[in-house]
Amino acid sequence: MNIFTKIFGTEQNEKDTLVNSVETQDMIDGIVELSDTSVKDVYVPRIDVIFLSEGVTLNEILNIMEESGHSRFPVYRDTLDEIVGILYIKDLLIYIHKLVNENDFNITDVMRKAYFVPESKKLDSLLREFKRLHVHIAIAVDEYGGISGIVSMEDIIEEIVGDIQDEFDNETEDIVKIDDNAWLCDARTDIDEINDKLELEIEVNDIETIGGYVFNLIGDIPVKFEKIETSELTIIITEVDGHKIKRVKLVKKDV
């Protein structure tokens, strides 16, 4: 090894060490942010939530769904402070196919159990609860027991991977083909779009973006060049911004 290789090799190693140190610090900062951020800081406030009455008709639900574009609705009995469940539209669509008579519809037959959390709960703790209980949305309760809003897995993921494309945003995110079986994808790209373009069958499980999907798989602060294996894909995190996933490489397996 000549003197130039030694010098420039050493400088490059020092640069790599510095970059890794900065990225590590960003990840630590991200963890601290989650542990310092409460549900109240990220939830959708009660005034902006669309609630469904327990006595709502099927036709009313379909109209509300079409007008709002939302996919989940808290269900209440008598008052908004008495939440009895959560309606997932995907559950409703399955239920409708089995429904013989529309007049027999009862929302309690299809809604899921509501999960309640204090609005003071920290996001790192809530994330662990979401994963343990396999739920993706919770009802936030204030110190007096009243309903103050709703918080979802997406709200927490946004703290990790950045803003998630909302249900009204029609902007198309980049999916760039770089090889016969490989693509670079923006972390905010909708999973349904990826499934269509790559002919995959990724199960979304109420997570809308590929960044959120990857974060849910690793269950930790993302690391650049981290590799995740699924039955259909090899996923490589190619770009991060601090603790946020920015871009991933998807390599489709021959199955």
Image (spheres, rainbow, N blue to C red):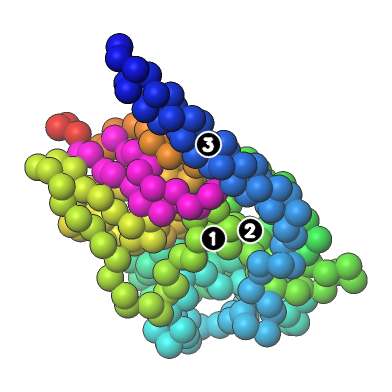
**Residue kind at label 3, given as amino acid type:** Leu
Q: SS class of the residue under badge 2?
A: loop
**Residue kind at label 1, given as amino acid type:** Glu
Question: Residue extending furthest right?
Answer: 144
Q: How many marks?
A: 3
Q: Which residue is mark 1?
A: 158
Q: Nearer the viewer, mark 1 or mark 2?
A: 1
Q: Which residue is mark 2?
A: 113
Q: Residue at x 48, y 52 (%)?
A: 241
Q: SS class of the residue under badge 3?
A: helix
Distance between the alpha carbons at the discs numbered 3 and 1: 27 Å
Residue 237 within the magenta-colored segment of the rendering? yes
Give the mark, 2 or 3, whose residue is nearer the N terminus.
3
Question: Residue extending furthest top?
Answer: 1
Question: Residue extending furthest left?
Answer: 180
Observer-nearest of 27 and 99: 27
Give the mark, 1 or 2, whose residue is nearer the N terminus.
2
Q: Which mark is residue 18?
A: 3
Position above or below: 7 against 77: above
Q: Quadrant of the C terminus?
A: top left
Give the mark, 3 or 1, whose residue is nearer the N terminus.
3
Q: Nearer the viewer, mark 3 or mark 1?
A: 3
Q: Quadrant of the N terminus?
A: top left
Distance between the alpha carbons at the discs numbered 1 and 2: 25 Å
Q: Residues within 10 Å of mark 1 (few under 14, many from 20)?
A: some
Image: magenta residue range: 234-252
Q: SS class of the residue under badge 1?
A: helix
Q: Which mark is residue 102?
A: none
Locate residue 196, reporting x and y percent.
20, 58
Q: Residue at x 72, y 62 (%)?
A: 39
Observer-nearest of 5 and 145: 5
